[in-house]
Amino acid sequence: MPKLRWVLFYAVTAFIVAVTVVTFYKERHRIDRLANSLESRMEEFEEVTRRSQEIQEKISYYQTPSGITFLAIDEYNLVRSGEKIYRIEIISPDGLRDN
């Protein structure tokens, strides 16, 4: 029959090993979760950086004379000197009927 102190020693050792193994796996799971979170945040950061870069490029373009010209034509329907404007009017066939 084993002595009580050896049984107690093995029980305490087994308990410490079990706690260590469980803690290790919990920490490993936590590290994996944090790594996935970090990866998704980095993807968001790259997307925001890319959008910011595109906006900076647009700002730089719109500060040039050709950018200002494009903006005036596109947004405010202005024309350059010497250009002709053609206006197309569509008349509905419903308006031509006499009742």
Image (tube, rainbow, N blue to C red):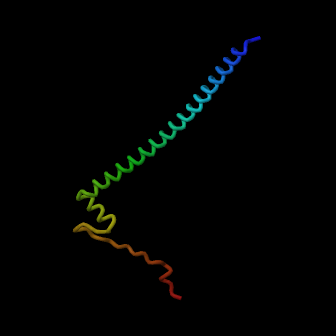
Q: Position of residue 28 (x, y in %)?
A: 56, 31
Whether residue 33 sits left or right of residue 76 in the image: it is: right
Between 61 and 42, the residue placed more toward the observer is 42
**Residue 15 in the image, given as x and y percentages of width and height:** 65, 24
In this rendering, is residue 72 above or below 92?
above
Q: Residue furthest top?
A: 1
Look at the picture and state if 85 lies above or below 63: below
Name which residue lies at 51% across and 38% down.
34
The residue lying toward the viewer, choosing from 2 and 65, is 2
- In this view, the residue in front, 91 or 61, is 61
Residue farthest right in this picture? 1
Q: Which residue is drawn at the image coordinates 30% and 55% (left, top)?
A: 59
Residue 56 image point, x, y percent:
32, 52
Tally of numbered tags:
0
**Residue 23, image x and y in percent?**
59, 30
Left or right: where does residue 24 sit relative to residue 7? left
Between residue 54 and residue 76, name the one nearer to us.
54
| 81 in relation to 62, above or below | below
Residue depicted at 39% across the width and 75% down the height: 89
The image quadrant of residue 46 is: top left
Locate the N terminus and report the quarter of the image it occupies: top right
